[in-house]
Image (tube, rainbow, N blue to C red):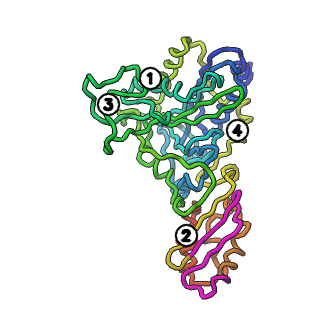
Amino acid sequence: MSVAARFSRAVTAPVKHHVYVSQCQDVATNLSIEHYLFQKSHPESTVLFLYVNRPCIVLGRNQNPWLEVNHSLVRRTTASISPLRTLSDRDRQQDDKIKIIRRRSGGGTVFHDLGNLNFSIICPPASFHRDKYAEMVVQAIRKTNPRARVNERHDIVLDPGELLNAVDRPDPEDTHRTAYAYGNGTLEPRKVSGSAYKLSRLRALHHGTCLFNSPNISGISDYLRSPARPYVKARGVESVRSPIANISVHQSESPSSTIQSLRGQIIQAFIHKHNLNSNHLYPLSEPPSPAIGLKEHHKCTSGVIDAKLLEIPQISAGRAELETRIYLKIKSGIIISSQISTSTTLHPDAEHRAFNAILQDQKIIGIKSFGDLFLGVEIGGREEDIRGVAAWLDLMLGKEGSMNE
């Protein structure tokens, strides 16, 4: 029997509990497998799916990429990947890019890499509760770090303070409190796991991250901080930003070794919770083809915005500093209108028309740089001012830049 046939049979079988572990590190493939499990698994079953992705940024279903991601930084960056992986030069060039993708669930934008373990729980809606499996994951994390707990937002955080006096310590089984202090401004909890959810009539999905030993931990917030945020008005759900940390205190360990230990701890916690045995474990040594058929719904892009990410209906970007004014209205990735005037123009209306004639109906994805777009075009105003307009637009919208270099 083929891998695909075995996978399909296992997923649809009337078995109460399943555990799947993906050996694939491609985010689009893993999200596709997850969605296949969500759609096809038996409606009475509970499924645990674990996977690790190469460096990527994953947006929530209703989020706007212009507000959530520093596209210029992503474009310039070569991702940190495991030195243990052996790839051809061609594959390494592709894998070194930080991909951007949108998932089907809500929630905020997250950064994945080889030091982050992703978990998915798929279960009947009647047994779904936002804290239920977060508490299970906390029990697993506490094997490594006893500071972990579930907070009021259903995220998993670490309490960074000193050990409490014995009389003040909670029950060790309490997954919402720890024996460590936090608060008072300087000792805020550090987030190590965020969750998102998707509900249908027959199935409930809870999936989340676990920052175990991310080599990119110090730079994650930079990737997820868009320079356009102060200037953009957009439809979409904004992320709630929190200070983050790694679960592992042993930063010298390789991501793969720590991830393996955490993965095993989560599987054991799932087995213990449901009184199972290891016969329910299904390692996925290669991507099963039934799930790959869904991969087209999870389009990736390496450091740029593609059409799949432009589902947010409309954004407006504008800046008014000194005498230079820039305003763009963008819908479905296409510039609908613009109003741009520079500091030295004597005829702002004529300049508006000149810029608009260039920009209107341009697809953002098709613009390599605004500098190139404006190069050699008679717009009005000094070339220095036009360079400034191009440089600002390139930075805000994640373009390469040319005219300003």
Q: Secondary structure at mark 2?
A: strand
What residue is disc 2 on?
319
- In the rendered structure, the answer to whether residue 114 lies left or right of residue 167 reads right
What residue is disc 1 on?
139
Q: Which residues are magenta?
A: 325-350
The vertical placement of 284 against 73, above or below, is: above
Q: Amino acid at mark 4?
A: Lys
Q: Which mark is nearer the camera, 2 or 4?
A: 2
Q: Earlier in the sequence, mark 3 or mark 2?
A: 3
Labels 3 & 4 near each other (Cβ < 8 A): no
Q: Earlier in the sequence, mark 1 or mark 2?
A: 1
Single out the residue that lies furthest toward the bottom. Answer: 346
Q: Which mark is nearer the camera, 1 or 3?
A: 3
Whether residue 93 is visible, yes or no, is no
Residue closest to the eye, 274 or 217: 274
The vertical placement of 33 against 229, above or below, is: above
The residue depicted at 66 percent of the width and 78 percent of the height is 352
